[in-house]
Amino acid sequence: VPTIPMLNTYLLQLQAHHDKKTLTPTDLGVRAGVWKATANNSYKIGKTVHLNMEIYTTAIIVANNVYDNVFSIPPQYRPLNDTVVNVVASDGTYKNPVACTSLAKENGNLFVCIPKATNNYLFIDAEWECG
């Protein structure tokens, strides 16, 4: 027979599962036209946003340029504090990966600095607390 604490644990897990909201690129404010999501497994559970996506741009990437036009994250999903996020850039054949300097800002912008000019696929892995 399950104990009361075990049942409470199961109920919390069930509630978390039902509180999970899948977030689309549109929900997240990816700037359409410039950036296109090619894969997305992003969601929000409680106050935590998990970002896991691959996006692509047709724009010419300028090495070491700071791009602040990747996202315009809606207020309900914005980080409470500026948050460093993991971004790796790669080319179309998934070769030559490079780590990018990246920051999700409280104002909803996602800043990315891509060290090499040829890498127009971005792999984003991030987590932050929202309001």
Image (cartoon, grey):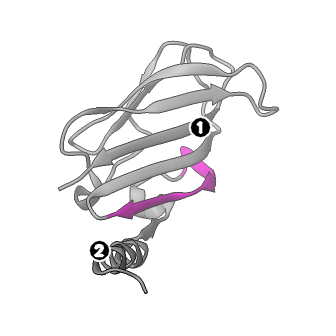
Q: Secondary structure at mark 1?
A: strand
Distance from label 1 to label 2 (Cα)?
Answer: 40 Å
Q: Is residue 10 above or below residue 61?
A: below
Residue in the picture at 57% in, 48% down? 53
Q: Is residue 71 magenta?
A: no
Most extreme residue toward the bottom is 1
What amino acid is found at the position of numbered circle 2 in the picture?
Pro
| Mark nearer the N terminus (1 vs 2) | 2
Q: Nearer the viewer, residue 100 or 120?
A: 100
In the image, is residue 88 above or below residue 50?
A: above
Q: Quadrant of residue 61?
A: top right
Depth check: 113 or 16 in front? Answer: 16
The quadrant the N terminus occupies is bottom left
- Tag shown at residue 100: none
Identify residue for label 2: 5
Residue 92 rendering spot, x and y as whole percentages:
77, 34
Q: Nearer the viewer, residue 90 or 60?
A: 90
Disc 2 crowd rating (10 Å Cα; few below 14, some 14-19, many 20+) is: few
Mark 1 vs mark 2: give the one in front: 2
Magenta segment boundaries in residue numbering: 33-45
Q: Position of residue 20 (x, y in %)?
A: 41, 70
Q: Position of residue 117 (x, y in %)?
A: 63, 16
Q: Amino acid at mark 1?
A: Phe
Label number found at residue 123: 1
For image coordinates 50% across by 40% down, the residue present is 125
Helix, strand or loop for the magenta stretch, by majority: strand
In reply to whether residue 35 is colored magenta, the answer given is yes
For this view, does 105 lie left or right of residue 54?
left
Name the image quarter holding the C terminus: bottom left
Residue 99 versus residue 18 in the image, above or below? above
At 58% across and 56% down in the image, what residue appears? 40
